[in-house]
């Protein structure tokens, strides 16, 4: 009823997946933002047991930094408007 894939088909699937992974790795390496995001994602995976503390802490840090930088941008825009 169901046919098992032959060894050639399985090898072709693996080859296709390896090529896809190589293309993705190349694209990630070409873009620093993606490279950093991948590194952060890996670090978060390693810290999974501490997520209950780490994620709220990161959110608070993000909000503080965002508000400070946003205030700086608005201040520069106000000075340029004058």
Image (cartoon, helix red, strand yellow):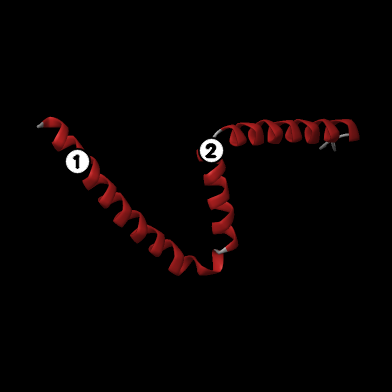
Q: Residue at x 89, y 31 (%)?
A: 8
Residue at point 55% right, 69% down? 49
- Residue 40: x, y in percent? 53, 52
Residue 26's spot in the image, x, y percent?
65, 32
* Disc 1, SS: helix
Q: In the image shown, does 29 or 81 lie closer to the viewer? A: 81
The image quadrant where one finds the C terminus is top left
How busy is the neighbourhood of tag 2: few (under 14 within 10 Å), some, or many (20 plus)?
Answer: few
Q: Which residue is mark 1?
A: 74
Name the residue beneath numbered marker 2.
Answer: 32
Q: Quadrant of residue 28?
A: top right
Q: Residue at x 55, y 64 (%)?
A: 48
**Disc 2, SS:** helix
Q: Is residue 69 above or below residue 52?
A: above
Mark 1 crowdedness (10 Å alpha carbons): few <14, some 14-19, many ≥20: few
The residue lying at 35 percent from left, 54 percent from top is 62
75 vs 30, left or right, is left
- Marks 2 and 1 close (CB-CB < 8 Å): no
């Amino acid at each position: 009823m169901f046919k098992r894939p032959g060894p050639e088909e399985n090898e072709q699937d693996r080859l296709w997946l390896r090529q896809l992974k190589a293309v993705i790795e190349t694209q990630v390496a070409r873009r620093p933002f993606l490279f950093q995001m991948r590194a952060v994602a890996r670090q978060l995976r390693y810290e999974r047991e501490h997520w209950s503390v780490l994620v709220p802490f990161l959110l608070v840090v993000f909000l503080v930094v965002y508000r400070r930088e946003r205030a700086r941008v608005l201040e520069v825009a106000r000075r340029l408007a004058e």
